[in-house]
Amino acid sequence: MAPKARLAAYKVCWSAGCYDSDILAAFDAAVRDGVDVVSLSVGGVVVPYYLDAIAIGAFGAADAGVFVSASAGNGGPGGLTVTNVAPWVTTVGAGTLDRDFPANVKLGNGKIIPGMSVYGGPGLAPGRLYPLIYAGNEGSDGYSSSLCLEGSLDPNFVKNKIVLCDRGINSRAAKGEVVKKAGGIGMILANGVFDGEGLVADCHIIPATAVGASSGDEIRKYITSASKSKSPPTATIEFQGTRLHVRPAPVVASFSARGPNPETPEILKPDIIAPGLNILAAWPDRVGPSGLPSDKRQTEFNILSGTSMACPHVSGLAALLKAAHPEWSPAAIRSALMTTAYTVDNRGGTIGDESTGNSSTVMDFGAGHVHPQKAMDPGLVYDMNSYDYVDFLCNSNYTTKNIQVITRKNADCRGAKKAGHIGNLNYPSLTAVFQQYGRRKMSTHFIRTATNVGDADAVYQVAVKPPSGTLVTVEPEKLVFRRVGQRLSFLVRVEAVAVKLSPGSSSTKSGSIIWSDGKHVVTSPLVITMQTPL
């Protein structure tokens, strides 16, 4: 992303985990050393910001003008799984590239099942089909053997066969090692229902491939029916190397954590997505590419997946933006990345969701997928400073003592009322949460201030795409800038009509506010959530 950037590394994780004291010390050391960007591929459970070491450390960094990019977490595809949700942190989800590594399963009945792998060793004999078994049918403890846990497979049943294992408990590569120890010749790794259809390519130690949940079901059914017939179940794995120009792409990775924001629903998280599935990444040469102690292979690069891969993409882009615009604040850099992000894939449709095959939503991709070239020249930015974040914390009903834990300096909430509600934080996205309480109509407003970083004389006209069932107005409808650096404010009013919901449920709709001067297009997601209390 930023090939000429200089790197400083700070160790915060050990074999027993990542300690708050090390995280805080690393943030302070990085700020002291004069870094411009902190890239944090670490996360934990969501807690109030004053109990969150990452939020506290990141506040100090942002206060010193350092951009902080953090991974959204790999707890997807379920909702409310996103982590690192503080508004002074740029939270990054994971998308796919238009490149993958097909390794398909060919069954004895001729059916081809799509799979994924970066296994690089000797392949299976071409044109030959091997006996196929489901591990869950072969062990004394069906549950342990189905997951191919250590010691669960009987070599008498497994030797010289391809074994179907289920995902879960132990690592994906470790399952291959269990199959290999039991004499198996290959492995098919099936996703569980929760994993959906998302496929991760691994550098296995035996010929192995990953298949989706529905494909796993199909292979199990084939094994069951073939076992009862005269032709026992057989299969092979066909490794096809690297495939380019994959469509559709990008797609939100199945594991990428999703909104809504568990701590502050009025702030949309994740902010953006970036490439995070099957990424070519640097790798230590003393560790085998599978990560297993028994793996003695050496490599300088590996294929890795996770929001931990997406986060550094954005960190690199932030470094490029900081080099091009040294005067930009961390909030301005994030704004440039968010308002220029795209939500359309290479087929012209809305970015999809790998886990379901359906379209994704703002809760999955935030403002969209980063667009480096456009982020360089966004036209307008929504800027913020530490005082704005303190007002946000005050209006979030945090006590002065709690706020001081985060800011590490005296906090003053006397001016916070002027900012209005927490949704008025000058964020590049706008989110309102309505509690219905039997009311038929509800309304709110947002105030945003745009800073001109484009042409000196620029006139921006607004276009509104309201979330369905809402009335949205923007005043004024035109922003007339006379100089670079000029700040102009506008008011967004939202009226929503109650929807039928069962107690305790919610409904989320999204739209957008788009400012354009004919050269720049500045897009902000507008998200409306309706909730019915229990």
Image (spheres, rainbow, N blue to C red):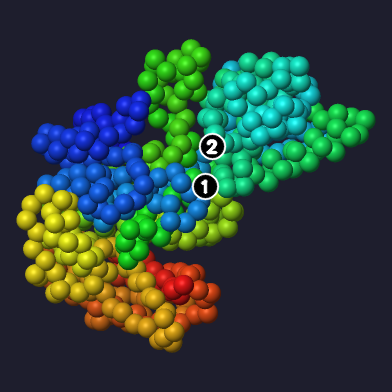
The picture places residue 418, in percent across and down from the top left corner, at: 14, 74
Type of residue at label 2? Answer: Val
Q: Quadrant of the N terminus?
A: top left
Image position of 479 (left or right of 189): left
Query: Cβ–Cβ below 8 Å for labels 1 and 2?
Result: no
- For mark 1, does the 10 Å Cα neighbourhood hold few (<14), some (14 to 19), or many (20 or more) residues? many
Tell me the tag on residue 191: none
Vertical comparison of 334 with 224: above or below: below
Dot 1 corresponds to which residue?
Answer: 254
* SS state under label 1: loop
Q: Find disc 2 in the rendering and name its residue.
A: 200
Name the residue at 53% across, 53% down. 353
Name the spot of residue 199 as percent of width and height, x first.
57, 40
Q: Nearer the viewer, residue 258 or 182?
A: 182
Three-letter code for the amino acid on which mark 1 is drawn: Ser
- Which residue is nearer to you in this view: 51 or 291? 51
Number of callouts: 2
Q: Position of residue 210 (x, y in %)?
A: 61, 34
Tell me where residue 90 appears, x and y as whole percent: 29, 51
From the viewer's perspective, is residue 531 above or below residue 235?
below
